[in-house]
Image (spheres, rainbow, N blue to C red):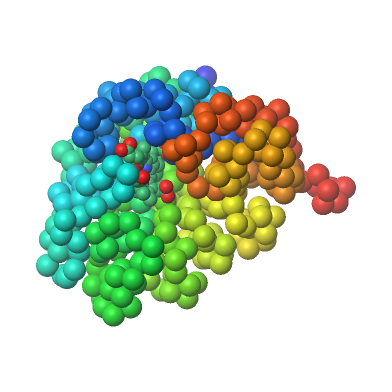
Amino acid sequence: MSQNATLEHSAFLRATRQEPGDRVPVWFMRQAGRSLPEYKEVRGPGTILNAIQDAERAAEITLQPTRRYDVDAAILFSDIVTPVFAVGFGIDITPGVGPTCEQPFQSADDLGRLRPMDPDNDLSFQTEAVEKLVSELTIPLIGFAGGPFTLASYLVEGKPSRDYAKVKALMMSDPDLWHRLCDRLADLAIGTLQNQVAAGASAVQLFDSWAGALRPEHYREYVQPHSTKILAAMKDLGVPRIHFGINTGELLPQIAEAGAEVVGVDWRTPLSAARERTGGHVALQGNLDPALILAPWEVLEKEVRRVLADNNGHPGHIFNLGHGVLPQADPDQLARVVDLVHAEGTARGPVSQGASA
Ligand code: CP3
């Protein structure tokens, strides 16, 4: 069997199709990076964008967690701001802070700093890293991009924000400019995702991490059309699409509507409730509280079992945290979580919903 055909039967890809399998697949958002001592050794000086642009180093950092943990998928070491950076908008990642722009997006003039992407020139480092990884990995590689609201929040605020005041003000006061901005961001997301899939990525995730700051009517009007466009552009590429944001309990129906096969759920919403809110049409990914990795094993173990029990054996479940691995997380605890999910989790279909289930 070719490697692609073998991957099609992997626990991860089966779960995205809601097919019963031998085990519940598991991987962790932000599994590569700051929580690993071996990351600190190879990351090098400068900002993380320097490491991302070095294909050799980015591939090595992507592989690091797959050596430590028996995870069912790898995620490319990159960042959601990579495409915006690559077209020269003027964005950086300040260590300990996050994405920052010296000249935030303020008016239509700033659209000129978001020129169309030319993947062959702008993203050659990414193509090289993905190609190298798929030749080495025996598990699927997940590619990703940032969602419209989350990326726009960094561009407009110029830094991480608690209240999203500036970005919401722009969205509500100048909807025309807002939609033009999001349209450019959507095109950049499509460019980077298509590039990752062409180079061999087996799945893609759209991270609209901060979209949960919006009420459902506003999400539907200002954000969902752009996410729908991104996901629709990926539909015929034959890879599953995952769509995730934190604090999105109230937005789960709209997020499911945008078109992905898998919806990520943060720790605030039980998987059983998320399944109802998404109408049962999508697979779910999540949703252990990342803070629990810092708890004593007896506590953590109980909570892992709680997530599995809440999923009730549904085949469309990819175990993950409800958000990224915290920098202070102990890698050994994550390794134990993976092993427990594999030992205990069954993906054979709901167990207590009638004899025919
Ligand atoms: O998941 C993985 O292991 C792949 C790597 C990955 C990174 N960023 C590497 C990174 C992924 C998937 C991302 C996505 C990302 N980046 C998101 C969406 C996921 C989420 O957490 O909601 C967001 C919102 C960003 C923006 C961003 N980049 C933030 C908020 C930060 C943290 C700033 C800090 O230092 O506290 C970053 C920096 C960043 N991205 C680091 C890593 C490993 C740490 C910086 C470093 O090593 O210098």
Determine which quarter of the picture holds residue 307: top right
Q: Does residue 258 lie above or below 86 as drawn?
A: below
> Which residue is drawn at the image coordinates 30% and 28% (left, top)?
43
Q: Does residue 175 lie above or below 75 as drawn?
A: below
Q: Position of residue 133 (x, y in %)?
A: 37, 25
Res 75 seen here:
no
The residue nearer to you, when weighing 173 against 206, is 173
Q: Position of residue 124 (x, y in %)?
A: 21, 34
> Which residue is drawn at the image coordinates 68% and 43% (left, top)?
303
> Which residue is drawn at the image coordinates 29% and 70% (left, top)?
166
List the single residue furthest toward the bottom. Answer: 173
Left-right relation of 346 to 177: right
The residue nearer to you, when weighing 40 against 68, is 40
The residue nearer to you, when weighing 83 against 28, is 28
Q: Position of residue 323 (x, y in %)?
A: 50, 47
Res 357 seen here:
yes
> Which residue is drawn at the image coordinates 50% and 35% (left, top)?
329
Q: Does residue 251 lie above or below 341 as drawn?
A: below
List the single residue furthest toward the right. Answer: 355
